[in-house]
Image (cartoon, rainbow, N blue to C red):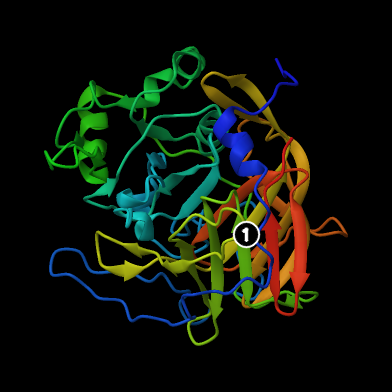
């Protein structure tokens, strides 16, 4: 049930701080660092092959070798299964750089509590021998599990969240540490005690346990290699969740992708925002995406002690998509619980994602939008 309640003390402290201005100094300059491959796990950049059909693929009738979450050609054997969803931490800052985010097809970032965010990363076409650190579930995860019909690896949850997940029709696909033991879910470092996943080992555990892992209907996204008409030239996107969690995406024309920069310091009391590139600790490579999408939806506080947030991710709502250095004002649509998210243009047509990876930033319906020159800034607002 929705409850009109107040923020907890820490959230209120953060929310009442003066907002950093959109022209606050960016202390980390925009530089692109070359990927560094390791001997054990080369970094994989997914790119459309020459001859990508002009009509693209989707939102329905994907060929068996086209990943419906990236629009890219993939070994059909890698698609003959469910997506694997893994909950990844984002705070405290010493959990960064995280492991394995660069190998996810899709990543959602969303507000959790006390001004913080976490990720839910979706692995379908690629494996990663280390993903993490892994943290606990939230109510929002239910939407992603249903949408992608996935397996879900996480590290426990508040009893109210856990009860909802365990009473759902996907409860047999919940993968917890005390059930899926090492090597699927491990704590390999006694100093940090971080929980880490191995996607290949999880798949083997699922097979051994007889957990449902068959091919699912994941239609809904539309992909085209050519840049759609109607975009506005925007090369930098800010997603400001609070004075302690904020990020930006910088467009790199040579690669045609967006590089992620993250907070280094708290921007309290008018202090400037400080950024640095986010890298993947698994492969020592920068985090980048072919598509960045801001999704706006209602947020309500279910509880204040502890702080628990509900997101109302059904029906439709405002969306802003960024691809090829251009910005598009759109609408997200999810009519049924198990529908994969679609983006729709103002004239009712399916908006084409660029073939490749996508990061979704989930923010409140009343999020403040600021435009300055070639940058768009989104500042999280409740409800």
Q: How many marks?
A: 1
Q: Residue furthest right?
A: 347
| 315 vs 80: above or below | above
Q: Is residue 69 above or below residue 172?
A: below
**The quadrant where residue 269 appears:** bottom right
Q: Does residue 111 sit above or below 265 in this rendering?
A: above
**Can residue 75 be seen at all in this image of the molecule?**
no
Quadrant where the N terminus sits is top right
> Image point 71% across, 70% down: which residue?
327
Q: Which residue is rendered at x = 53% and y = 36% of the image?
A: 112
Of residue 51 and residue 98, the one placed in the foreground of this image is 98
Q: Residue furthest bottom?
A: 254
**Front residue of 378 and 166:** 378
Label 1: which residue? 270
Rendered location of residue 113, percent (x, y): 53, 34
Residue 52 falls in image quadrant: bottom right
* Left or right: 75 as drawn, with respect to 114: left
* Image quadrant where one finds the C terminus: top right
In percent of width and height, residue 89 lies at: 38, 43
Residue 350: percent from the left, percent from the top?
A: 74, 58
Q: Is residue 244 visible?
A: yes
**Which sits in the foreground, 245 or 365?**
245
* Residue in the picture at 47% in, 12% down: 163
Vertical placement of residue 111 versus 162, above or below: below
């Amino acid at each position: 049930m929705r409850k009109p309640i107040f923020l907890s003390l820490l959230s209120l402290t953060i929310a009442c701080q003066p907002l950093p201005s959109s022209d606050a100094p960016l202390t980390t300059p925009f530089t692109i660092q070359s990927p560094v491959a390791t001997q054990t796990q080369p970094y994989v950049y997914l790119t459309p092959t020459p001859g990508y059909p002009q009509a693209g693929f989707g939102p329905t009738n994907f060929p068996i070798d086209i990943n419906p979450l990236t629009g890219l050609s993939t070994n059909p054997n890698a698609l003959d299964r469910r997506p694997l969803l893994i909950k990844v931490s984002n705070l405290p800052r010493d959990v960064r750089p995280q492991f394995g985010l660069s190998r996810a097809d899709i990543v959602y970032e969303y507000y959790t509590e006390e001004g913080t965010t976490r990720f839910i990363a979706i692995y379908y076409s690629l494996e990663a021998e280390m993903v993490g650190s892994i943290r606990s579930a939230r109510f929002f995860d239910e939407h992603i599990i249903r949408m992608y019909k996935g397996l879900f690896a996480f590290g426990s949850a508040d009893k109210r969240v856990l009860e909802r997940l365990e009473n759902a029709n996907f409860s047999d696909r919940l993968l917890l540490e005390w059930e899926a033991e090492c090597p699927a879910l491990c704590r390999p470092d006694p100093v940090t005690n971080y929980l880490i996943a191995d996607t290949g080992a999880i798949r083997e555990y699922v097979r051994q346990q007889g957990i449902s892992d068959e091919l699912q209907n994941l239609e809904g996204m539309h992909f085209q290699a050519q840049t759609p008409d109607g975009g506005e030239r925007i090369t930098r996107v800010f997603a400001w969740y609070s004075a302690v969690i904020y990020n930006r995406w910088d467009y790199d024309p040579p690669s045609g992708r967006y590089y992620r920069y993250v907070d280094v310091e708290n921007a309290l009391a008018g202090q400037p925002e400080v950024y640095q590139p986010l890298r993947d600790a698994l492969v020592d490579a920068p985090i980048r995406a072919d598509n960045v999408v801001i999704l706006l939806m209602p947020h309500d506080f279910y509880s204040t002690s502890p702080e628990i947030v509900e997101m109302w991710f059904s029906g439709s709502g405002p969306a802003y998509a960024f691809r090829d250095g251009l910005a598009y004002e759109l609408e997200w649509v999810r009519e049924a619980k198990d529908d994969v998210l679609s983006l729709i243009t103002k004239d009712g047509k399916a908006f084409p994602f660029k073939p490749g990876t996508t990061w979704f930033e989930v923010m409140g319906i009343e999020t403040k939008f600021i435009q300055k020159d070639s940058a768009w800034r989104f500042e999280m607002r409740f409800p």
